[in-house]
Structures are given as C-alpha cells and as structure tokens.
Image (tube, helix red, strand yellow):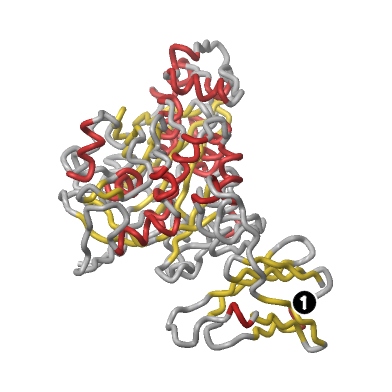
Amino acid sequence: MLKRISFVFLFAISFIGEIHAQKSWWVFFTDKNNTTFDPYSYFSPEAIFRRQKLGISLYDSTDFPVNENYISLVRISVNQLGHVTRWFNGVGVDASDEEVAVLRKLPFVREVVPQTDWDIVPAFTKLFPDTTIEDDYGKDRNLKQQIDPLQGKYFSEHNLKGNGIIISVIDVGFHGVDNSPAFLKMRFNNRIRSTYDFAKDVSDVYNSKADHGTMVLSCIAGFANGAQMGLAPDATFLLAKISTNLTNQTHGEENFVAAVEWSDKQGAMIINCSDGPDENSYFPEQMNGKISLMSRTSNMAASKGILVVVAAGNEGETSQPQLLPPAEADSVLSVTALNDDGIIASYSSYGPPPDFGRKPDVSAPGTAIVANGDGGYEVAEGTSFSAPLLVGFAACIIEKYPDLSPMMLIDSMRRCSSHYPYYDYSHGYGEPQASYFFDSLKVAPSTFTFIKKDEGETIKINENSMPDCRSHKSEMLFYSLEDSKGRIYRYEVINIKDDDHIEISLDDLKVGTKLHVFYKNYYATESF
C-alpha cells in the first residue's frame, strides 16, 4: 500500500469521561518562589559543557524547578497530572471545565489554557520496485540522490561523521531500531545513550509498530549493506517517543515540551523534529513562531545552545500550504523538501510566515532510502526525511567547528547553500553544500544579463550558458521580486531549455522593487 509518512497536530478534542468531560490543559504558575537549583546535579556533564562553551548561564531561572507545593495543590484538584515544564513554569493536566474554574482561582496560578492536541494521519511512502543498494558509499542511484546533492563525500573524506555530537530524535516511534541491521554499528558502539517514551512514561521506545522515527534516524546514521544513508553515523543519540500509535494525542504538545527539556538536560547539541500541526490547527496569522508552544519551546532550546532542525510540513497540496509550527520559529533551521529535479516537491509546505520573515532557511532531498521497522529498506518521501539529512550535515559542521552557537550554525548553513544569496520561500537559500567548508570560494561566471526596456525587464541567457540542444536535461532559472520593505511578493522557477529570454512584466517592477535572479551558480540583482 502506497502511503506518505507525516504527522499532524489538531486543536484540542475533548473526550467524555465517566462523569465529566475531560480535556488537556496547561496550568502556568506565577513564580518559582521557595525553589533551589544545583545545575551540577541536574544537568549531564555534556549539558554543562555546552552551556559553558557558549557562554550560557548555568543559573537561568527557566531551568529552576517548579514549586512542588504548587504542583501538589494542583494534583488534588484534577483528574490527572501530566508532565511538568520548568522552562514555562507549569504542568499539564486532564481536567473538566469545573475543575479548571477552581484552578483559575488559585493565587499562584497565572493562567490555565487548553493544550493543542494532535492526530497521527498516515501519508505516502513511495516504494520503488527497482531499488538497489550498493555496497560502496554513494554508488547507488538512490543513495546518491540523498547524499550527493549535499556533497556528503567532503565530510566522509575528511573523516567528519558526527563523532562526539549528541543528537536527539523526537518522533512517533522507533520500532526495529533495537534489532535492525541498519543500526548494528550504532548498537555495537553503544551510541544510543538514552531513550524515553513520554506518552507512556517508560524508557522503552521500541515496543510499538510505529517506525517513523526509525526511518528518520536512518537518514542521519543508518547503514544499508555497508553504505552510509546519512552523514553522521558516528554521532550519539537520544531517542524520545512522544505519541502512541495512530490515535488522537491528547498530550502531544505536552510530550514534545517534556522531550525537548529532557534532551537539553541530557546534553543534546541537535534536535530533529519531523512532526508538527496540520494547516487546520491554527489560523494562518497565528503560525508566526510566537503562539505555538512547540515554536516557543524550539526557540527556547536554541537559547540553551541546541540547534533544532525542523521539517517544513507536508501540506503543499492543501488549501493552507504554509510552514507548520515549529518550522516558522525564528531560531530553528527550517527545511523544505526537493524533488529529483532539485525544485520544491509538490507536497512540501513553504513560506512565508505571517511576518514575511526568511523562513524556510534551506532545502534538501525529500526522497530517501530509509530503514523500516521490519528490518528492511524502502524508499520514502516527505519533509520528514529532508530534515534529518541536514541534521547529519549540521553534526559534521559542529564536529569541525565546535564553538558555533545555534544561530551561527544556521547562518553558516544558509551561506553554504547552493543558491545563496538568492532566496525564495520554497527553497530557502537552496541545498547546503559541504564544499563550502573545504574549498576556496570561486566566482561563478556570468550566465545571464539584464536588459531594460520600456515595456519591461528582460533576462537574457548568455550564449555559452544555454543548455545543449541535444540534451533533455532541464536548466532551472530562479527569480524573485522583493518590495521596498524587503518582502518577497513573487517568485518563480523557469525551465529555460527552449528559451534564452525571460520577460518580466513592468507592472510588477514598482519603484523600490528589487529583482533577484539565480542561474547556474550565478546570482545578480537589479533595483528599480
């Protein structure tokens, strides 16, 4: 059965209890009075080191524990107590409307708000019957499609494979990771440091049939017949399961927040997030990086020195295809998916966010060989797999440049991308290129020129840059129009195989407009 893998969040849906309707809520407190904090007994040594290296305080109040007396008083007032969040000074609860009314009257309660629940909805996994996996790294056509566009061999040739980097994968399930041949090397070298199922409050993350996390993990550090499937096979991993299989997740948001705080405590340097709400979870203007608690949590993680890499979402073919939280958050690396032609895949969500900020940041192949929970391999597509491919890329950069902060790392991954400084809301700055960190930068030869005319602007392709008429290969030219406020209001990808002139309507070129063009590694801009 063909299916696309994706996961979506929905607004809170109540269920009927035996006596009262119970819902999931956040209870946030006014203060952290009468609490004490010893970072050296709370954080792992790696978390301490990360903070010290980046100049982050070990005594930030957001890391202080929540007042236990407050929690105890809430516990006796509700049906069920959930996870505690230090960062946001609160606790998740299941409670009826009547119980919530009581909670809101407590003097130490700042506010009580509904949690955003989420549903798991299966989507496509595209299977290719002719898939083969060669023994030698990079020789197989499909492996090359997920490794070569990022120039992964540069890292391998310099022995950069994520050694010493702690990566947390927060996902739905990791069925098969404990016995699949794809992770034999990982298990043999004890590179799975810790696991936790936040939906069931147990350490075992392998006990369900859900294997989306298995697929994601394989895109970072899996092996297929000795061949690398991702760029960081020597990294160390934390595996966090935040949902049960194929049911409404009444505590999905709560489990995510708990998993991120746990990852921080355990010393994670990178977090992969390939889950998120669907287009119906928020109004478009609310997906701005400031309202969703997932987005706020991801931004908080960045302030703690953790790079959060986020899949854009698979809503490109829906009525609301914009970036899904937390992909619109300011301090994450937001990743869209590309098809085999190197342009945005039809299913991929894309920007802009409501403030017209530069999100997404970058893009990566959306089709990848993945390890499944049955111990086999298949070819899958989705932004869920674009993100982990770049997690491995980022791990190699941190291994080479260990003092980079998350925001410096995001800036580096933008600058090393294939289209930089050209930008649009589908591709970001393009695909990160490993050669940027090893080869001297070369000035690309001019591939086009601007010709101003009264009736419009013409982009003329230079004769020596035209595609060979005998070739069937497409040549893509990217252009965007930016208004006087720096907002991109139009962009397009054009196949110029049969045309050496592209006409831009004069009506679009208002005073203050900038035209940006990228073609064959050459970028130029024209102002009006």
The residue type indicated by label 1 comes to Leu
Rendered view: 379 above or below 498: above
Quadrant assignment, res 391? top left
Question: Pointer 1: residues within 10 angstroms few (<14), some, or many (20+)?
Answer: some
- Which quarter shows the C terminus? bottom right
How many numbered discs, if any?
1
Percent of width and height locating residue 99: 43, 33
Whether residue 255 is visible here, answered yes or no, is no
Q: Is residue 209 left or right of residue 43?
A: left
Rendered view: 221 above or below 354: above
Q: Is residue 513 left or right of residue 26?
A: right
Rendered view: 26 above or below 247: above
Which residue sits at x=54%, y=75%? Answer: 476
Q: Nearer the viewer, residue 373 or 504?
A: 504
Q: Is residue 508 left or right of residue 95?
A: right
Which residue sits at x=49%, y=40%? Answer: 397
Which residue sits at x=47%, y=43%? Answer: 394
Q: Which residue is mark 1?
A: 509
Rendered view: 379 above or below 155: below
Percent of width and height locating residue 358: 63, 55
Q: Nearer the viewer, residue 89 or 377?
A: 377
Q: Nearer the viewer, residue 214 or 94?
A: 214
Whether residue 135 is visible here, answered yes or no, is yes
Percent of width and height locating residue 467: 52, 81
Percent of width and height locating residue 79: 34, 31
